[in-house]
Amino acid sequence: MSQHRSRLFRAVHAALWLGGTLLASQAALAQTAPPVTGEPETPAEERAEQAGRATTLQTVSVLGSRRVERSSDTASMSPVDVLPMADAAQEGPQFDLAQTLQYASPSFTSTRQTGADGADLIDGAALRGLGSDQTLVLVNGKRRHTVSLVNIYGARNRGNTGTDLNSIPVMAIDAVEVLRDGAAAQYGSDAIAGVMNISLKRRKGCEAVAGYGEYTRGDGENWLATAYCGAELATGGMFTITGEWQDRDRSDRSEPKGSPRIIGDSKVENRTVYINGDSPIGESAEVYFTAGMQDRDASSAAFAREGIGSEDIPSRNSEAMYPDGFVPFIDGDLQDRYGIIGVRGDMAQWHWDLSHTYGYNELRYTINNTLNASLANLDLLNGGEGISPASFDAGGFSFQQNTTNFDVSRYFDTVLSGLNVAFGAEQREERYRIRQGEEGSYLDYDGAGEGGNPGSQGFPGFQPGDVTDAERDSWAGYVDVEVDFTDRFMMGFAARYEDYSDFGTTLDGKIAAGFRASDTVLLRGSVSTGFRAPSLQQKYFSSTITDFISGEPVDVVIASNDSELARLAGVPNLTEETSQSATLGLTWTPRDNVSVTLDLYRIDIDDRIVLSGDFDTSDPTIGPILEAMDVGLARFFFNAVDTRTEGADLTVTYDFDWANAHWSTYLGANYNKTDVTQVNTPPALVGREDVLLPERDELFIENGAPRSKAVLGVDYERGPWQANVKGIYFGEQELGTFSGTAAGVPNQHYAAKASADVSLTYAFTENTKFTVGGANVFDTFPTRQNPDETDNGHVFESVQFGLNGASWYVRLWHRF
């Protein structure tokens, strides 16, 4: 109860601090701002505007087109979803961006991992069933950096980096634009599956939200305090600031209840501030800026170490410290920094934009409630009680990115029915570093194989040999042309050349076309080539970690791509992934309040980078080396496979008035199927294809995301009341087992399941409303499995909608 009161006090304190800080900022800005005239929109008017944007998709969009004159999705040659965030920030059941999009966009996937080390601390996000690093994320049209983490474990995004969407407060966002089309020829590396652009708010006024929720089983408490303020500057520009505090507690779905395992949501506390704005320079130019900062304290539970009497005790525990066993905690200190500074304007009908973007992400590990068993054993041999420190600094890693862009465009309305020409250049510098942990986090104190295992149990620290400081730079040039040949037929052409210092050059292109078959039907399609540069994280990550194979602990070395071990194993240097994409679809708008889009797609990826299977001590080449290192397995990053992804996206929106109420409905559905079409075996590894990509790892690639997903939402509004019902369908998944089908053990089959979210909102006044609701209200869980064969050692993998069950929540929104 005291802990509950403490969190309540912190939530109130955070809300007061955020509100006071942002109101002070508003007051300070008001002293230099011109007076604001006119009445604010009522909540009903705002909701009507948001509903219209959500259902008819008429919000202007820059994604997928470089026209200064923007277009809606139903007039675009490429499929673009526009997802307004106002209702999600004020009333939604999910408190972070990744989970908000998971339950709003059918082509988007983000599943919280558990029992997956650092992947528990950062939620991966991706489009169309592909990897998280094959989706490019932009903020206000500028490239956002990826995280420093590369996922090693978990049922999703293994071997991938990605972008941490949860480092951006939902309250700061106006809309999320999702381009469901290959776009590397337009935007560069990582845009194989598509592009997401997070458009930040730019509006006057202040608002704040306080929220609380928890799972119906009484754990996973979620506290939220967030506020936004925007004001016009005396110069005529705009300044906005958003602050957010979020505190999420652990959940535990371990079986049997009370077992030493902890399986569920990690513990997370976020403290985030974002600013965004612009100011005119003269009559034809403006300076603009964005800055974001988040500090996150996060903690995940590692596999439990057993108590006295188990076979595990001589090597991984100490009777004097944990006679009943223990759960090590992998605690992460994450820092994320992001900034954009730019100037743009018009000159002789040409629009130009010069900008610099900075991104930084750092993760440092502290392992708590642990021990170094070899140190405890040495203490015992020296006449002590067998004691080791219970906490270790295990080191960590960071990633930094600096990007400079210069873009120029012009629209010629006298050429044919319209011609837009754009061109530009980009220069980017990246740096990846690994910092070693303290000696006790990795050293073997009692001699290899003599009693206790070395390093901090749960997560051994980074060793001196892992320390990395790697850099690279790249530059690119592009041209992008869109032609309206007639009022009904348009085409787009894009080409991009990139030169990377670490692997060479690439040239990619895209052709898109749209034909308005009637006033209500637009046919559209595109073909493109693309690429994804291997991340520095994939090239240089190195660590010795503990994996659990069928419930048994095994020490595993992840060798960097440029290591001597990789060279001896015959692992070639990483190079870029290349892709060929095709999309064919249509839009239909039979009435102003109805829209339908259908798009079919195919994405072929060659030389896709994956994390290999396990090379063990029986390997004829590196087996003796592994024995000398006192580790059982080794893994490497390879350009190992070619894949083919085929699928379809469908959206249907309809809003209407009936029974003295306004109704808005939305249906979105995605189907995708990924197949490994070829395994690219290096000459030195011919004959060991089953080790390079075993069945279990192949299924992680093919079935890491559900093959189908659908979202059906209905909004009801009458007077001060608003209700929302949303059904989410997750298709089946099939993952592998440790034993494998060759041993007669069937794969893990996860049957299709459906979840549902509901909410009810009451507006006390135009400026205050209260929401109560629930998520996964039918308490649906994935299909049960054999815990000895799952990746996290639990009866459920982290698939589909997760493994926590139903939850409830409340939110209070107020506009100042």
Image: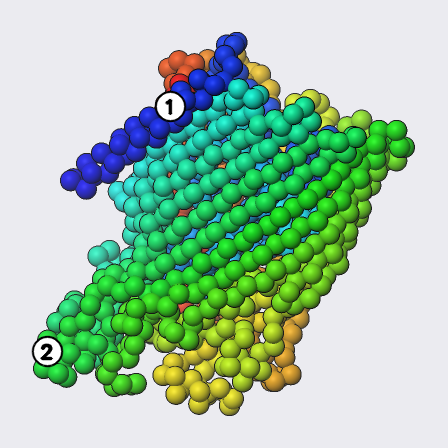
Q: Earlier in the sequence, mark 2 or mark 1?
A: 1
Q: Which labelled disc corresponds to residue 23? A: 1
What amino acid is at disc 2? Gly
At horizontal 55% and vertical 63% (from top left) the residue drawn is 471
Foreground: 680 or 363?
Answer: 363
Question: Left of 386 or right of it: where is 454?
Answer: right
Tell me if 472 is positioned left or right of 448 in this view. Answer: right
**Residue 175: x %, y % from top left:** 55, 33
Residue shown at 45% from the left, 82% from the top: 616
Determine the image quadrant of residue 213. top left
Q: Could you tell me the amino acid type at mark 1? A: Leu
Residue 714's tag is: none
Which residue is tagged 2? 384
Marks 2 and 1, how far apart in space? 59 Å
Judged from the image, the secondary structure of the residue bearing numbered disc 2 is: loop
**Mark 1 residue element:** helix
Name the residue rendered at 38%, 23% in the picture: 23
